[in-house]
Amino acid sequence: MTQSGTVRILGIAGSLRRNSFNCALLADAQELQPGGVTVETFYLAPLPMYDQDLDTETAPPAVQAFRDALWATDALLIATPEYNHGVPGVLKNALDWASRPPQHQPLRGLPVAMMGATPSMWDTACAQAHLRQVLVFPSALVLPPPEVLVANAGSKFDAEGRLADDTTRTFFHGLLVALADWTRQVGRPRQEARRLTNA
């Protein structure tokens, strides 16, 4: 956290689709962020597929940029669609890169919240459950409920791609408040580790 107490949240979306509902959610986060919170986003498309031959002391530039962004943030907000009852490959790939190297990876102790939107009548509960499982091994600190599950997303966004459903906006704002509070409660050990690493 900054000296002023501002909580910095990094948002990533598990979709590369143009006009993605999940990317739109992250864009709305900057409007719905509560006081004392800032939200920035990182686009995952430049990340190469994980290849251990590339996982050396000198990481690919896009990978290093992603790891640096994770180290620089106080919390992570993930927006994920659901593919085949799980998380999309692009998101799993990003988290695989972020969990390396094991002895110095930025997910350990990082507060994380998740949400998801889908155009179908089913929500993204399976994907979010899968995501929670994926985040266990790297020791991320995943926020308990509330959860944001946006089904029938086409009816929740306006023609400009802005989240227009008042109930969903209220849930989303609550998630951001909960993530900020969670970060202030559990984020101190990670902040100390980051300070020592960068000393």
Image (spheres, helix red, strand yellow):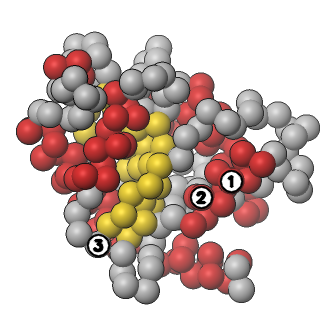
Residue type at tag 3: Gly
Residue at figure coordinates x 49%, y 28% from the top left: 15
Percent of width and height locating residue 27: 35, 43
Residue type at tag 2: Ala
- Vertically, is 42 above or below 40? above
Location of mark 1 (residue): 65
Residue at figure coordinates x 87%, y 40% from the top left: 54
Of mark 1 and mark 3, the one earlier in the sequence is 3
Q: Residues within 10 Å of mark 1 (few under 14, many from 20)?
A: some
Residue type at tag 1: Ala
Residue at figure coordinates x 68%, y 53% from the top left: 65
* Quarter of the image with the C terminus in it: bottom right
Residue sticking out furthest to the front = 160
Percent of width and height locating residue 88: 53, 25
Residue 124 visible to the viewer: no
Q: Helix, strand, or loop for circle 1?
A: helix
- Cα–Cα span, label 1 and label 3: 25 Å
Location of mark 3 (residue): 36
* Quarter of the image with the N terminus in it: bottom left
Q: Number of marks in the image?
A: 3
Q: From the viewer's side, name the closer residue of 97 and 102.
A: 97
Q: From the viewer's side, name the closer residue of 159 and 111.
A: 159
Residue at figure coordinates x 40%, y 25% from the top left: 20
Q: Quadrant of residue 149?
A: top left
- Vertically, is 179 above or below 84? below
Mark number, residue 69: 2
Q: From the viewer's side, name the closer residue of 11 and 129.
A: 11
- Cα–Cα span, label 2 and label 1: 6 Å
Q: Are marks 1 and 3 in contact (CB under 8 Å)?
A: no
Q: Helix, strand, or loop for circle 3?
A: loop
